[in-house]
Amino acid sequence: MSIPNRPSLADLIRMPLGEIVALSGDILALLQDEVEENLRHAKTIKDWLDGALDRKYGALATEHRRTEGKDTGSVRFDDGTVTVVADLPKKVDWDQEQLAATVERIRASGDDPTEYVDLSFKVSERKYGAWPSHIRTAFEAARTVKTGKPSFSLKPRLP
């Protein structure tokens, strides 16, 4: 759909919010589509560049980490006048069933498991919604509902 004299994304950033709010749904939908396309395009370019940087510096970063005696984390080295900071974050996953069993063994031996682990409980909204009302009532005081950032998706209707 082409709409003459519609603002570009470059115009949009300089427009007062009230003028943007006053735009028609058709124009806002086009702008939203354009933003989404630009984001997809930017992500593709970023992924491509990140791949090139990994190819250029990955082995060197691994060697620096090995020399420093670490498997993860940040290392710094120079490439001409540029300092490269190569970070390999540590991501740890814990098997929840094994953790629960270990916590129970600690508790059974008379020790306090909270000295070793942080205990938390989660309830999925799907499960909560399926509970009988007397169970939901028992948990009500522990439940707080917060909202996230609102989002709007504008889809032009076909004639």
Image (cartoon, rainbow, N blue to C red):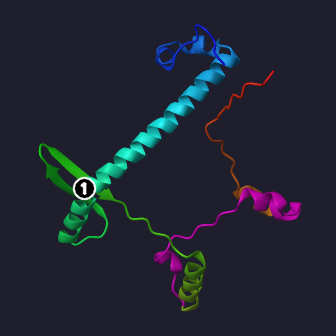
Counting the numbered discs, the total is: 1
In this picture, residue 108 sits left or right of residue 1: left
40, above or below 126, in the image: above
The residue to which callout 1 is attached is 57
23, above or below 56, in the image: above
| Residue that extends furthest to the top in the rendered view of this protein | 5
Q: Which residues are magenta?
A: 110-137
Query: Per the image, is 109 magenta?
Result: no
In this picture, residue 121 sits left or right of residue 111: right
Where residue 74 sits, quadrant-wise, is bottom left
Query: Per the image, is 132 magenta?
Result: yes
The structure residue drawn at horizontal position 24% and vertical position 55%, both measured from the top left corner, is 57
142, above or below 116, in the image: above
The structure residue drawn at horizontal position 38% and vertical position 64%, both measured from the top left corner, is 90
Locate the C terminus and report the quarter of the image it occupies.
top right
13, above or below 121, in the image: above
The structure residue drawn at horizontal position 69% and vertical position 18%, both measured from the top left corner, is 26
